[in-house]
Image (spheres, rainbow, N blue to C red):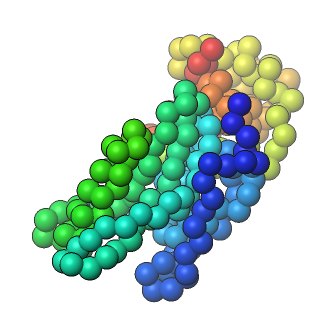
Amino acid sequence: MFDLQKPKYKPIVLPRNKKYGNNCWLASGPKVGQRDVVLYSDLEFDHWVTVETNPNVLTYCEQPLEISYTLNGKLHSTIFDMWILMKDGTERFVEIKYEKDLKPDGRSYIRTKRQITTQKEWCEQNGLQHEVITEKDIRAGRFSIDNKLKMLLNYINHDKPASVDLVKNYMTKQKKAVGDICTQLKGKCSTYEVLLACQWMCYSGIASADLKEQIWGNKMEVWSLE
């Protein structure tokens, strides 16, 4: 079992200057033992939310490792945006970019291309997966980030809800609206308790929900994964 108190990597602390930290976020994550997590852009924060709410992720480390590369005869360095360890034991390093930075006519395209190539080559040499993720991947769905953030905050701020087992009994592998579960549990659980239980189960990987196209509420469809 992986020990969160003995992580494989430790975050590299970056200076909060014009290059790093214009939109700096400070958070804490259950998957890293509730330690402080520093994200250096809005996109990195949104990505962190998707990682923290992915039930298949065991743990992660932001800004985990720095490697070097040469461009135009000069030595440069690059820091991976995140290292992720999945529950099945696979590891991958992630680089987060905006789509515009990956286009040949982009101002920083040459540097970005060399940076990504260096990261991919290093991962191949070390038998690790590498993934480039953009805002189109991270922010897919109108309500995805807002829903996942609400789910995460409720998981952090509440112990396992007493209503979980009761709500679970009324959840099936077929999609069912939260409002329908509330109707079935009328007098036993409030709407808030049902929503809290659903969010806790989704974070834990016991259930899933249509997080992309519907906000948390009576119309949200949920289903059991067990």
The residue depicted at 19 percent of the width and 77 percent of the height is 72
Image location of residue 213, percent across then percent down: 44, 40
| In front of the other: 105 or 64 | 64
Above or below: residue 193 compared with residue 88 = below
The residue most toward the left is 105
Q: Is residue 187 left or right of residue 107?
A: right
- Quarter of the rendering containing residue 192: top right
The residue depicted at 53 percent of the width and 14 percent of the height is 174
Point out the image quarter for the C terminus.
top right
Q: Is residue 69 left or right of residue 224?
A: left
Q: Is residue 198 visible in this depiction of the protein?
A: no
Q: Is residue 213 left or right of residue 188?
A: left
The residue depicted at 23 percent of the width and 62 percent of the height is 113
The residue depicted at 53 percent of the width and 20 percent of the height is 175
Q: Is residue 15 left or right of residue 204?
A: left
Image location of residue 36, percent across then percent down: 71, 62
Image location of residue 3, percent across then percent down: 73, 40
Point out the image quarter for the N terminus.
top right
The residue most toward the bottom is 18
| In front of the other: 8 or 134 | 8
Image location of residue 215, percent across then percent down: 54, 43
